Image: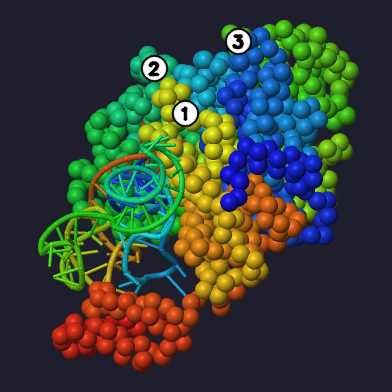
Amino acid sequence: MTVPYNHREVETKWQKIWDEEKAFKTSEDHSRPKYYALVEFPYPSGQGLHVGHPRPYTALDIVARKRRMQGYNVLYPMGWDAFGLPTENYAIKNHIHPKIVTQNNVARFKGQLHALGYSFDWDREVNTTDPKYYKWTQWIFLKLFKAGLAYKAEMPINWCTSCKVGLANEEVVNGVCERCGGEVVRKVKSQWMLKITDYADQLLEGLDTVDYVERIKVSQKNWIGKSTGAEVDFILKGKEDKMTIYTTRPDTLFGVTYMVMSPEHPFIEKYKEDIENWEEVVAYREMASRKSDFERTELAKEKTGVMLKGLSAVNPVNNKEIPIWISDYVLMSYGTGAIMAVPAHDERDWEFAKKFNMPIIEVVAGSPVDVNEAVFTDVETGTLVNSDFLNGLSVAEAKEKIISFLTEKGIGHPKTNFKLRDWVFSRQRYWGEPIPIVKCEKCGYVPLPESELPLELPEVESYMPTDNGESPLAKMTDWVNTICPCCGGPAQRETDTMPQWAGSSWYFLRYTDPLNEQALASKEALEYWMPVDWYNGGMEHTTLHLLYSRFWHRFLFDEKAVPCPEPYAKRTSHGMILGSNGEKMSKSRGNVVNPDDIVREYGADTLRTYEMFIGAFDLSAAWSDEGVKGCRRFLERVWKLQDILTEEEGYSRDLEVKMHQTIKKVSNDFESLKYNTAIAAMMALINEFYKKGRVTKGEFKTLLTLLNPVAPHITEEIWERTGFGGRIYQTIWPLFDEAKTVEDTIEIAVQINGKTRATMDIAREEEKSSVIARARETVSDKLTGNVVKEIYVPGRLVNLVMK
RNA sequence: GCUGGUGUGGCGGAAUAGGCAGACGCAAAGGACUUAAAAUCCUUCGGGAGUUAAUCCCGUGCCGGUUCAAGUCCGGCCACCAGCACCA
């Protein structure tokens, strides 16, 4: 009998050996085929590692370990996305420098990850808060600034009243702050902006060139929100100005019965004198501006608005005079801030027209009911009516014809719009990368010379944000007051810092060459390692981190700083791990599982195995303590195979097929996120060994190798105890022979009219006629009618169709 | 509302490409071992009828269809999850 499996001894022993042997150090040998596996680096929070972290880390650790065994030079790195609000808030509360807080948290995380036996190359660890790292974050910002993609703008921003900080649109969820849940209001502030909109088309088209799971592509497409249509100039009656609108349905131009402007539209102020009901308009405008974005969408059920008396528009295609309204269902920030309303064929316009009794004119026929009863928006089936030269055309034909008409007459042109907005890049906070810009009275905004990077965060007394919305850095007058790099005159430093998304927008580049002081990474390293071959991360980062980092990467590609336009060749997403009650884990729900407890009690290998076995990788799964025990039991059974190990080297004849089938299944499943079925196949295999009461050396070696990426410690220990020689992490991934994955005799089903009535064994090579003859024999007592058809699916079944 | 996804035993979940539904695991029940318990090992385990057997019927959210054959394909619904949401 072999000694009992002691996970604590085994795991600490091998973690030490791997460290000493630098087992997972990435090679600098660029002649070997490379594989770059990447998981999102964590924010080192004060809570320590969450039980959700190991799921993606283990999944890609499996891939990385398998690739090493297949001879690849593998880069599987880890680091820290360490700037951010929770650290700063903790620092404020406890009067500890955020730097110290970060250090402590990183140490804790690192210890926890180490205890899980991940094959990260810790020599390439990066930390976004390290000045040697953020020097290059600032460098990229300067490049963006010089390219005209970073600009300062007076912007109505999303202001979190609790964090006292401006948020990007992406960080506002259901009208509240994504991080703290605090109320978000609109506030006008001068902010640094990044022109991600310049890359909208590229970011959209690039999606066709990469292997991302469908739902990620769809989310990104929705977020970018490309729409095509036309801009059309309406005449503002009696004025010089044209009233330009954007529409995706220029084909309905003859159905316009009124116009709507956003309450913030500049024409309102400009034509103040002409507006007869000015007081009513002002009242409406004020009401609208008081609403937060949240209320504006929440209260969307009822349309509101005010007609501008004294102003009217003229439809350029039929010279009809139509009224102009203002309403907050039209947004100043999209299109031109004004629309043409076609109530018959647009849902919102229809509602508005119904409420305010505006006329509804049908211009696309084909609605099952009268357009006064229900709106008709179908673009596939309709035919144009009441539309002069467009009559009789389909919607698609009419669009084309009207756009060329408008273009020829000079009253309109085709136009593409995006929902994507520029990225609000400043935060009024301390714990972030300083923005390397100074403001000079004479020269305006001046970038620091590259030689002055990194611009380090100064030591401050207090990290409290100020009530007037200034960063805590603003109080550091010694630091703020500086000299203009351009004219040498007095100037002030920018006191806002960068958002957390900055450091994570390029970290994967730094891993390829983390100590480089001359560049963000060497050309050679980037050319060898990029793009990332497989990147896994959370669904919640689809429209934030993933989009931002693709934007920066495309920009760096244009700057010739990186060798490829897309950073990630493949992107997958893992599902969440929920509490045992099926709800999201949280302290308040009392369903939190601490990974340290599981590692202590059952071991890292058990936790790794369990998290891979828990269910489909991309779906969320509920935690189960019993399931953990089941996985521990499996590993114990693997351990105890030592008791029935024989001296034979190869596979025993009766298990040869099973061995090849298992190698094939595990090899394929590890590539396609099907870790649960890979483990199931290995469980089934050891059940076979136990059924036979023996396992050969060859069989055991193969099993251990297949299992090693999932449970690296126990397999390494058994490998050593059984004297298989060397280290398992240095062995070669087992190969399978396709021809040997099929049994010589196969059990097939014999069906009558599609229902299985019996099974029988056939030889692999057996002729169809012979199989069918024997099948009829097997079920002869049930063949009570005429067999009108015989179907043979090789290796599967015979179906006899009886009348 | 739009988009994407999911729906299979008591539970987590399997099932290339239309081909024996329920792999693997958990829980449960019975048994062996033990003074006992835990652990371990063996057996049973979708529902119903039938003697516990042979055997038969039903069964993958619902209704219909295609097919020799449907969890899988088609048409029409329902529920849940996620993302987006007055974007003209």
Residue A156, visible in the rendered structure:
no
The front one of A746 and A331 is A746
Q: Residue A204, relative to residue A696: is it above or below? A: above
Left of A534 or right of it: where is A355? left
Residue A792 location, quadrant: bottom left
Question: Marks 3 and 1: same chain?
Answer: yes
Density class for disc 3 (Cα within 10 Å; few <14, some 14-19, many ≥20) is few
Q: CA distance from mark 3 to mark 1?
A: 24 Å
Q: Are marks 1 and 2 on the same chain?
A: yes
Q: Residue at x 23, y 44 (%)?
A: A374
- State the mark number for residue A657: none
Q: Examine the rendered structure and indicate whether residue A522 appears above or below residue A776.
A: above
Q: Which mark is residue A592?
A: 1
Residue A337 in the image, given as x and y percentages of width and height:
47, 33
Look at label 1 and name its amino acid.
Val
Structural distance between the alpha carbons of marks 1 and 2: 44 Å
How many neighbours does mark 2 have within 10 angstroms: few (below 14), some (14-19), or many (20 or more)?
few
Residue A540's place in the image compared with A283, above or below, is: below
Mark 2 falls on what kind of element? Answer: helix
What chain does badge 3 belong to? A
Q: Is residue A696 in view?
A: yes
Q: Mark 2 is on which residue type?
A: Met
Indicate the quadrant where residue A668 lies: bottom right
N-term-proximal mark, 3 vs 2: 3
Where's residue A465, x and y in %? 62, 12
**Residue A287 shows which numbered tag?**
2
Callout 1: SS? loop
Q: Which residue is mark 3?
A: A93
Ranked by sequence position, the earlier of labels 3 and 1 is 3
